[in-house]
Amino acid sequence: FAARGCRHMTFVDSGLVSLSNPVRQSLFTHQDAAEGRPKAQAAAEAVRAVMPDAEVRHVQMEIPMPGHPHQSPDGLRKAIQQLKDLVSSHDVVCMLTDSRESR
């Protein structure tokens, strides 16, 4: 996307970088995994490192998934609204989550 002129990105994830990530996902390093860094934060920093003029931010949050335990009903409503707001404020949304349920 960066090569196509995309300069405003938001990464959303609740997970931490694990040792299996850097070998499959070029935004992450082994150092990220060794430090157990949040995925969204590490991804945003990786993009900023190669595109300093990009507007990149990260949001650390659980993505509600059907069939998985959730926070309270109020917390679930808040998370869904936050996701709706994020989606509506972007031109392109890429689902890069690991599981079918989170997509």
Image (cartoon, helix red, strand yellow):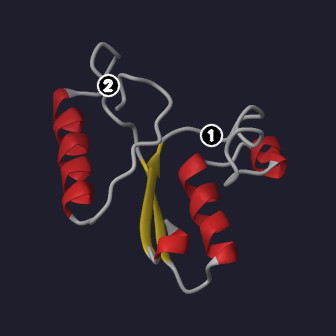
Q: Residue at x 53, y 71 (%)?
A: 2
Label 1 vs label 2: CA separation?
18 Å
In what element is the residue under mark 1?
Answer: loop
Label 1 or label 2, whichever comes before in sequence order: 1
Q: Residue at x 83, y 46 (%)?
A: 30
Image coordinates of residue 103 in percent, x first then y, are 34, 32
Q: State left or right for residue 83 relative to residue 18.
A: left
Where on the picture, by quarter, is residue 85? bottom left
Q: What amino acid is found at the position of numbered circle 1 in the picture? A: Leu
Q: State left or right for residue 17 relative to residue 101.
A: right
**Res. 65 mark:** 2
Q: Is residue 1 above or below residue 6?
A: above
Q: Nearer the viewer, residue 42 or 8?
A: 8
Q: Is residue 21 above or below residue 44?
A: above
Image coordinates of residue 1 in percent, x first then y, are 49, 65
Q: Residue at x 21, y 41 (%)?
A: 80
